[in-house]
Amino acid sequence: MKIDKKLIDSLSQKAEISERLRMNLDLRTSQNDNSQRMLNALEPGTILPIHRHRFSTETVIMVRGSLKEIFYNGNGEVTDTILMQAGGECPALQIPAGQWHTVDVLEPGTVIFEAKDGAYAPLCEDDILKI
């Protein structure tokens, strides 16, 4: 698969009209592929709950645009905010397993590449921080 401007623009257009203001593209090679690799198009205003991946690190690489990755402790207090920009000072980030986090999308047309360990597992109630 060629991941070119046309594909990225198309994904961003779908995110823009989506009720959730985001859209992902699964990059696994088959249903038997037990990895998690995706492009995720995110628009300003999208709401991602504060969450964690207890059993997986998460790698985030900026493809286009910018966002703030926000880290929290278990009490819901912000512990770090990292500005991520495609081509900027911090275009990629490795989020440790168990780290509470969310994003604040700063720019229309923002697209990230995400990878996590192992097969997809939906977040359970214990993995969403309610503050």
Image (cartoon, rainbow, N blue to C red):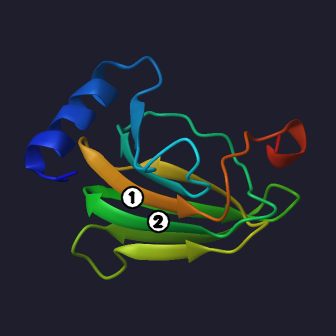
Residue 81 x, y percent position in the rendering: 55, 68
Splitting the image into 4 quarters, where does residue 21 fall?
A: top left
Query: From the viewer's perspective, is residue 110 above or below residue 88?
Result: above
* CA neighbours of label 2 inside 10 A, class few (<14), some (14 to 19), many (20+): many
Q: Nearer the viewer, residue 67 or 41?
A: 41
Q: Nearer the viewer, residue 117 or 43?
A: 117
Can you give x and y, in whole percent of width and height, for residue 131 in the image? 82, 42
Lateral position of residue 115 relative to residue 95, left or right: left
Return the mark for residue 60.
2
Q: CA distance from mark 1 to mark 2?
A: 6 Å
Residue nearest the viewer, comparing 100 with 1 = 1
Q: What type is the residue that disc 2 sits on?
A: Val
Dot 1 or dot 2: first in sequence order is: 2
Residue type at mark 1 is Phe
Measuring from the top left, give residue 80's x and y in whole percent: 62, 72
CB under 8 Å between discs 1 and 2: yes
Residue to which mark 1 is pinned: 113
Viewed as shown, does residue 55 lie left or right of 3?
Answer: right
Residue at left 70%, top 47%? 50
21 is higher (above) or lower (below) than 73: above
Q: Which mark is residue 5?
A: none
